[in-house]
Image (spheres, rainbow, N blue to C red):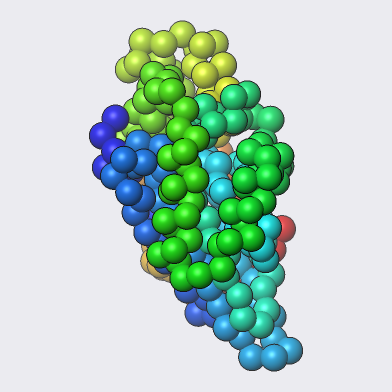
Amino acid sequence: MSPETTTTSEYGIVGVRDVDFTLDRIAPAADLAHLVERHWLVSWELPPGRTASVTLLGHPCVNLVLDRGVLSVAGIGSGRFTYVYEGVGRVFGTKFRPGAFQPFLGSPVSGLTDSGMLAEQLWGPPAAALAASMTGPVEELITQVEGFLRARLPEPDPHVQLVGRIVADLLHDRTITRVDDVVSRFDIPPRRLQRLFSRYVGVSPKWVLRRYRLHEAAARLAEEHDRPWAEVAAELGYFDQPHFTRDFTAAIGMTPVAYARACRRNEAALST
């Protein structure tokens, strides 16, 4: 897989994007791009006494996150996640490509799904020292994290590259509508595919495919309020409309019609 290949979507913020925060995405250094999708920074400045929130539908990625001085490894969240913020603050993260964190972890990534750990638990006191030193501008944070990762680069793992190719196809290729399509294309037995994703990604290939399609569906309905949702569903490979409605409602917490209506009215962010 080329380091330039995108393996996570640009979507994931549920509802109309809040004007109270800024999201910056920064590409990693070229020598780390086969493992790191991007760095990101969320920052905000609210008046005293005011709070805001953002609801996310996460990607199939592990993130290294610095929040309020604590550096943690965040696994994949299977559901929605709402972050409440106030005052002045920022959260910095490094998003690994799907499957690419497993060689750092050394155990199945499924153990981090819907959970995580302090970076110090994985890397010891140096991780705590790194967290304590990360107080400068975002450019310095990136330099520090990338230097930390370079000092701990694992041996090349061909499974990471294979997973990356599969996930890229799940994201970009609309002809893939079922896991059986992956099995055929990559000539990989279903059980091996499931084990591969459990160990390296942390969720199933079916989950990844569904999550990417729901990301795009939510984004389209938020931006194109009057677009027939059944048309959006069909374009994304959902030919069974009740199936789409069930999946969308379970992930977002609202039916497609109610979600589009809420976005049209710019109503408050959804919560878990």
Residue drawn at the location 44% of the way across and 57% of the way down:
142
Tell me if residue 56 can be seen: yes
Q: Left or right of 135: which side holds 79?
A: right
The location of residue 242, given as percent across then percent down, is 56, 42
Q: Is residue 180 above or below residue 37?
A: above
| Residue 187 image-quadrant placement | top left
Query: Is residue 12 visible to us here?
Result: no
Q: Residue at coordinates 62% horizontally, 56% vertically from top-left?
A: 131
Q: Is residue 24 shown left or right of residue 103?
A: left
The image shows residue 109, relative to residue 188, as above or below, that is below
Q: Quadrant of the N terminus?
A: top left
Q: Residue at 46% across / 70% down in the picture?
A: 137
Q: How many marks?
A: 0
Quadrant (top left, top right, bottom left, bottom right) of the C terminus? bottom right
In the image, 105 versus 210, the foreground residue is 105
Question: Is 226 positioned to the left or the right of 30 in the image?
Answer: right
Residue nearest the observer in this picture, 218 or 160? 160
The picture places residue 219, in percent across and down from the top left corner, at: 44, 59
Which is more toward the observer, 85 or 137? 137
Q: Residue furthest bottom?
A: 48
Vertical relation: 11 (above or below) 115: below
Tell me where residue 44 appears, x and y as whole percent. 56, 78
**238 vs 248: above or below:** above
Q: Position of residue 24 (x, y in %)?
A: 42, 66
